[in-house]
Amino acid sequence: MNTTVAVGFDRTSSGEYALHVAAREADIRSGSLVVITAYHWLTPPEPGSPASADTEATARKAAEEVAEYGAGQVRTHRPDLSVEPRAVPGYAGNVLAEAGHTADLLVVGNRGAGGFRGLQLGSTSLRTLAGACCPVIVVRGNAIDAHQRIIAAVDIDEDCDTVLDFAYDEAARRKAGLTVTHVWDEPWIIAYGQQDPGIAEDIARIEREREDRLAALVRSTEAHHPATHAFHQVCTGSTAGLLIDASQHADLLVTGARRHAEGRHGMLLGPATQALLRHAHCPVAVVPLS
């Protein structure tokens, strides 16, 4: 089955970097790439007037040129990769989320990707994630494979199989190392533990239990991915802070997000994931939880 990667593209540094990441993702999957540029226009006072048609045609032509430029860049560097440019009317986040209904992976820049500039930091990626039903890579940082390391951030209290499967597959395709990290974020317990030796013993016991649970989860996943062996660790502290620091030494950080209620596309982003999308030092892959 052919794998489709879709990317939101505009001619900004963020858009160019997203295009580079998406092309590489399509290539290592032996799939195809769809380069999407969203466009919109201001409707004149009388919709349907000749001026309205001219404005729409001008916006569409400009978007088609941008999408074709992006596709041309990919063809130059990856001539064997199947690439399709698309100019799609609508707001960038909505357009990309809709594309994710038929794609296997979405890639979006961290600001203004897909045809928009000057949006609030992360607004396009957040809108995309809010409506996407497939994994989304939000491109951050400015390096490709600088460390040959992927980090999978998992919550062992959730069903995180899809996060681990994505991370293990990605590590195998890239021939990269993989670290599976669970952060136990209970600051009030830690604060009490520093004052009460009895509570400190309870904390140590809980950490051992979580280490055992994470190790069992990793062993179970590796039974389905025998070519990849991961290092795993349980950390205690701020989830966002620890993962943002760790992202300085990774090429991709993989995390999960709950889906919306049944019947609705998209993901619900917790505060830690939102912090990663705004501050991580490497691209962040958000995978819908099972």
Image (cartoon, rainbow, N blue to C red):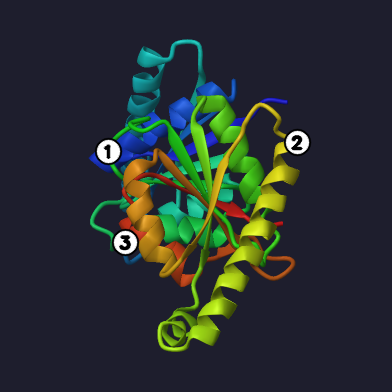
Q: Residue 67's spot in the image, x, y percent?
A: 38, 32
At a point 62% along the width and 55% down the height, the residue shown is 288
Q: State the residue position of label 1.
A: 142
- From the viewer's perspective, is residue 88 above or below residue 182? above
- Marks 2/3: CA distance? 57 Å
- Locate residue 46, reporting x and y percent: 36, 64
Left or right: residue 229 compared with residue 42: right
The disc, 2 or 3, on the residue closer to the chain's N-terminal end is 3
The amino acid type, in three-letter code, at marker 2 is His
| Mark 2 secondary-structure assignment | loop
Q: Which residue is mark 2?
A: 224
- Distance from disc 2 to disc 1, alpha carbons, whole Å, reads 32 Å
Q: Is residue 9 above or below residue 73?
A: below
- Labelled disc at residue 235: none
The answer to which of 100 and 255 lies nearer the viewer is 255
Q: Amino acid at mark 3?
A: Pro
Question: Nearer the observer, disc 2 or disc 1?
Answer: 2
Q: Which residue is mark 3?
A: 44
How many numbered markers are drawn? 3
Q: Residue at the spot x=39%, y=41% of the render?
A: 250
Label 2 crowd bin: few (<14), some (14–19), many (20+), radius 10 Å: few
